[in-house]
Amino acid sequence: PHGREPKEMPLKKFPEIAFDESKFDSNPTTNTFVQAGYTVTSSGNYSDDVNSQFTAWRSFTGLTNGYGPGWVSPSGSYTSGVANSTQSLTNIDTATSTGSVSSRNGAWLKLELPAKIKLGRVDFYDRYDDINVNGGAQERVSEAFVYGGNSNSGPWYEIGKQSDATNMAHYTDDNPASLTINTTSYYKYYIIQPTLLAKAISYGSYGQLMFYGYEEPPPAGDTSLDTTLKS
């Protein structure tokens, strides 16, 4: 008889909750939003008003087809659609980063999870659909980098690029660009950093961001005896 193949666990969506302004704690000074063990922050927002349609937590409500709400970076953080130095990410791991860089220009959005996960996919949503803004040109991101880390301040390990996602030319507020992530590492923090926009505008944005991954398995039991016997 053949032994059973181990069953592969399905990808699980994170955050597991929907951010809601009636439920989260926020600190406008540090641009931090905390709910049910998840923390969302960013390098900056188009508006620092917690109730604004453009603050970081808006990209984690789970609401698609939203006609506008989502994270929007500060005005002036992009020059004709290209990230400038007013917003940047530092402490990037040079061994994993494209171009071996240790820092990059561009606003960013960070999700801290209650426990480490191994990321398998990221879905990127625009803030608008095909017909309701600027002749359907929308605010799509052409390039963004995905990083993982296990400290709030890095180092940040590059694990993907949005330009490798499917549906990049057509993603909308309810039809995402979907990026498969190939990593063997479990991280507690994830960052999305758009660096190039499809339009020559002064801010980057997303409608929703959805992470799919695998929870870290529980630690194995004490194996010291096994190690002793095998040595």
Image (spheres, rainbow, N blue to C red):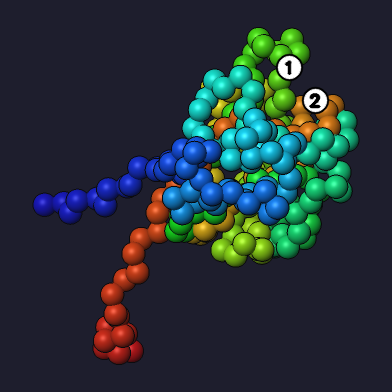
The local secondary structure at tag 1 comes to loop
| Amino acid tagged 1 | Ala
Q: Is 82 positioned to the left or the right of 205 in the image? A: right
Q: Report crowding for label 1: few under 14, some 14 to 19, many 20 or more residues within 10 A (C-alpha).
A: some
Q: Which residue is mark 2?
A: 199
Q: Quadrant of residue 60?
A: top right
Say whether residue 170 is visible: no
* Mark before the other along the chain sequence, 2 or 1: 1
Q: Residue at x 61, y 19 (%)?
A: 67
Task: From the top left corner, tell me how far across and down residue 175 is, in percent.
Answer: 54, 22
The local secondary structure at tag 2 comes to loop
Question: In the rendered image of this protein, does residue 82 appear above or below residue 97?
Answer: above
* Label 2–label 1 contact, CB within 8 A: yes
Q: How far apart are the alpha carbons under marks 2 and 1?
A: 8 Å
Question: Which quadrant: the C terminus?
Answer: bottom left
| Amino acid tagged 2 | Lys
Q: Which residue is mark 1?
A: 137
Q: Residue at x 44, y 50 (%)?
A: 36
Task: From the top left corner, tell me how far across and down residue 73 is, in percent.
Answer: 74, 38
Q: Residue at x 27, y 83 (%)?
A: 226
Question: In the rendered image of this protein, does residue 172 appear above or below residue 196?
Answer: above
